[in-house]
Image (cartoon, rainbow, N blue to C red):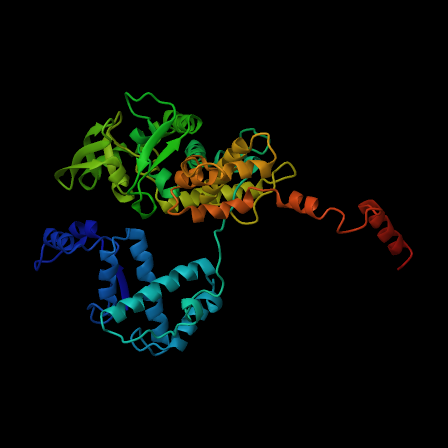
C-alpha cells in the first residue's frame, strides 16, 4: 500500500492531464473541505483508494486538525496496515493478538523502540480508528477487549506524567552563549566557530525563555507583533496568538524588553544580510507567496495578493503555513514578514530549528570542561525553556506572596482569602493563564519542582539516619584502616 498526503499547492506544478484541470481539483478539495495533509491510501498495483482507510483519512480532515497532525495520524494507520500485511491479516480482520504483536513490535522489537509517550499517542489514534469503523457499521466490535478502567491491549503499560526539564541560570547562559552564540566557555569569541547566524539562535532562546511560549508560537512571530516595525514605539511587546497556538486557543503573549532587544540586535546585524542574499530568489517565487501591500498595525491586519486574489487576514488568525510565505516589499526587494528567517529568505521550519539545537548540543558537550555547569543527562529541547519560564515565574510569585512570614502562615493566609482574590492572585493560576494551559491541573505538575526536597528531607528526618557521634570523616577513616589491615 502507498501512503500519500493531499498537497493542493503542488497541483499547478505537477498535475498534467487533459481530464481535469488543477484549478478544478483545487476547487473540489476546498468544496469538500479536504485539508492539506489529509492521508490518502492507494493500492500499490492499481493505485486505487483503499477502503476504509481513505474514509478514515477523510474523517480526520473534518476534525480540523493541522497539517502536521494529519500526516502523523496517517502514518500511524499506515504502519499498522503494513505490520498486519506481514502477518497475513488486515485492519478489518485483525484479532487482539495481532494488535498486541504490533504494540510489541513498536515498543520492543523494532530497531529503535518508541517510548511510552509516543506509543500513548499512537494507541489513541488506533483506538479512534476502530471507534470510527464501529460508528460506520463497518465492524461490530473492537478487536481489543476492554479491561479494568477502560484500558485495552493497546493502552500503554506505563502511565507517564509530564516530562518537565528545566535549566539553571548557568546552564541557560552556557547553552545560549556557547552552544548557539559561538563563544568559548571563557566568554571569549571562538575563531573556529562556523555557525550560521548565532544572533538568531540567541534571540530565539531569549524570546522562548522570556515569553514562555511554545515553539510554534514564538518561532512564527511576525515583525509587527514583536514591535520591530516602522512607527512602533519599541520596548516590551504584547500580542495575541491563536492560529499557531495549541488547540488554536487565543491568548496574549508578553515578550519582555530584554528579549525584544535581543531580537532587535539580530535584525540590525544579521537579518539584513540574509534578506539581501535571498531577495532575488523570493522575486522568482513571488507567484507562490502572499505579497503584502498593506500592514495595519493598529488593527492587527494584513492585506495583499495570494494566488492572484486580494486577501485580507487578521494576524492572529494566520497559521504557520501562511506566515511562512508572507512577504512585503523591503529595502532589498521582497522580504519575509516573520522575525526569523533562514538562508532561503523565509521562516525556518521545524527541522531547521531542530538542527540548530542539535548542533548547539554537540558544541556544548565537546567544549565542556571543569568550568562548565553540569549539563542535562539528555539533549536539551526548545520546550525546556518554557518549563524554565514556568518554574521561575511560579517560584517568584510564591516568594512575593509569602513575604517575610513563615511558609505555613503565608499559605493559610492565602487560602482564607476571597475566591475572587484567589483566582486573580494565586501564583499557580497566574502561571497557568500565562502558559495557556487548558486546565490548572496541568500546571500542578510544576509544583514538585519548586521546593528544595533534599533540604526538607534533612529537616524532617534529622537524627533518624546515621549516628551523630560518627562523622563522614570518621567513617571514611575507619574504612581506610580496614583496607590497610587487609580486612
Quadrant of the image occupied by residue 306? top left
Quadrant showing the N terminus: bottom left
Res. 335 in view? yes
The C terminus sits in image quarter: bottom right
Q: Residue furthest right?
A: 485
Q: Is residue 38 left or right of residue 378?
A: left
Q: Is residue 360 above or below residue 483?
A: above
Q: Nearer the viewer, residue 151 or 238?
A: 151
Question: x and y percent of residue 472 in the render?
Answer: 80, 46
Is residue 41 visible to the viewer in this orientation of the structure?
A: no
x, y percent for residue 386: 45, 41
- The residue sitting at 26% across, 27% down in the picture is 332
Please identify the quarter of the rendering in which residue 152 is found. bottom left
In the rendered picture of this protein, how many numbered marks are placed on residues?
Answer: 0
- Residue 294 x %, y %: 19, 29
Horizontally, residue 456 falls left or right of residue 9, namely right
Residue 191, percent across and down? 52, 31
- Classify residue 468 as left or right of residue 127: right
Q: Quadrant of residue 127?
A: bottom left
Q: On the rendered structure, is 71 left or right of 172?
A: left
Which residue corresponds to the image point at 46% horizontal and 37% vertical from the top-left? 426
Q: Work out whether residue 421 or residue 38 is closer to the camera in this orientation and state it.
A: 421
Residue at x 47% of width, y 51% of height: 162
Amino acid at each position: 500500500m502507498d501512503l500519500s498526503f493531499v498537497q493542493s499547492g503542488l497541483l499547478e506544478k505537477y498535475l498534467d492531464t487533459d481530464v481535469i484541470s488543477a484549478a478544478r481539483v483545487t476547487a473540489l478539495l476546498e468544496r469538500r473541505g479536504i485539508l492539506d495533509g489529509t492521508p490518502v491510501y492507494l493500492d500499490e498495483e492499481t493505485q486505487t483508494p483503499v477502503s476504509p482507510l481513505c474514509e478514515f483519512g477523510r474523517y480526520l480532515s473534518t476534525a480540523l486538525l493541522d497539517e502536521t497532525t494529519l500526516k502523523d495520524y496517517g502514518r500511524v494507520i499506515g504502519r499498522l496496515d503494513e505490520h498486519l500485511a506481514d502477518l497475513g491479516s488486515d485492519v478489518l480482520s485483525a484479532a487482539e493478538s495481532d494488535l498486541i504483536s504490533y504494540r510489541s513490535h513498536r515498543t520492543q522489537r523494532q530497531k529503535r523502540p518508541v517510548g511510552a509517550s509516543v506509543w500513548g499517542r499512537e494507541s489513541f489514534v488506533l483506538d479512534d480508528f476502530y471507534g470510527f469503523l464501529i460508528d460506520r457499521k463497518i465492524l461490530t466490535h473492537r478487536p481489543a477487549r476492554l479491561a479494568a478502567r477502560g484500558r485495552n491491549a493497546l493502552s500503554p503499560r506505563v502511565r507517564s506524567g509530564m516530562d518537565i526539564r528545566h535549566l539553571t541560570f548557568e546552564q541557560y547562559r552556557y547553552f545560549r552563549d556557547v552552544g548557539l552564540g559561538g563563544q568559548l566557555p571563557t566568554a571569549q569569541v571562538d575563531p573556529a566557530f562556523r555557525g550560521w547566524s548565532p544572533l538568531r539562535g540567541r534571540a530565539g532562546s531569549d524570546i522562548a525563555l522570556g515569553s514562555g511560549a511554545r515553539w510554534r508560537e514564538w518561532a512564527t512571530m511576525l515583525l509587527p507583533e514583536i514591535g520591530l516595525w516602522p512607527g512602533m514605539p519599541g520596548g516590551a511587546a504584547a500580542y495575541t496568538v491563536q492560529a499557531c497556538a495549541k488547540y488554536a486557543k487565543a491568548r496574549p503573549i508578553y515578550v519582555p524588553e530584554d528579549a525584544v532587544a535581543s531580537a532587535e540586535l539580530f535584525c540590525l546585524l544579521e537579518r539584513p544580510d540574509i534578506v539581501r542574499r535571498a531577495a532575488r530568489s523570493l522575486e522568482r517565487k513571488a507567484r507562490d507567496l502572499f505579497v503584502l501591500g498593506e500592514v495595519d498595525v493598529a488593527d492587527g491586519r494584513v492585506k495583499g495578493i495570494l494566488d492572484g486574489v486580494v486577501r485580507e487576514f487578521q494576524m492572529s488568525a494566520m497559521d504557520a503555513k501562511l506566515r511562512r510565505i508572507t512577504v512585503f516589499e523591503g529595502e532589498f526587494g521582497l522580504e519575509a514578514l516573520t522575525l526569523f528567517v533562514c538562508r532561503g529568505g523565509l521562516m525556518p521550519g521545524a527541522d531547521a530549528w531542530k538542527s540548530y539545537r542539535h548542533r548547539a548540543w554537540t558544541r556544548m558537550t565537546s567544549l565542556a570542561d571543569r568550568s562548565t555547569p553540569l549539563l542535562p543527562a539528555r539533549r536539551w529541547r526548545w520546550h525546556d525553556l518554557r518549563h524554565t519560564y514556568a518554574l521561575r515565574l511560579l517560584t517568584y510569585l510564591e516568594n512575593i506572596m509569602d513575604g517575610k512570614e513563615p511558609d505555613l502562615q503565608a499559605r493559610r493566609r492565602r487560602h482564607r482569602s476571597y475566591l475572587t482574590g484567589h483566582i486573580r492572585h494565586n501564583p499557580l493560576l497566574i502561571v497557568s493563564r500565562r502558559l495557556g494551559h487548558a486546565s490548572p491541573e496541568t500546571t500542578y505538575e510544576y509544583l514538585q519542582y519548586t521546593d528544595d526536597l533534599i533540604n526538607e528531607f534533612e529537616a524532617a528526618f534529622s537524627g533518624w539516619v546515621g549516628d551523630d557521634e560518627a562523622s563522614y570523616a570518621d567513617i571514611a577513616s575507619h574504612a581506610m584502616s580496614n583496607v590497610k589491615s587487609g580486612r
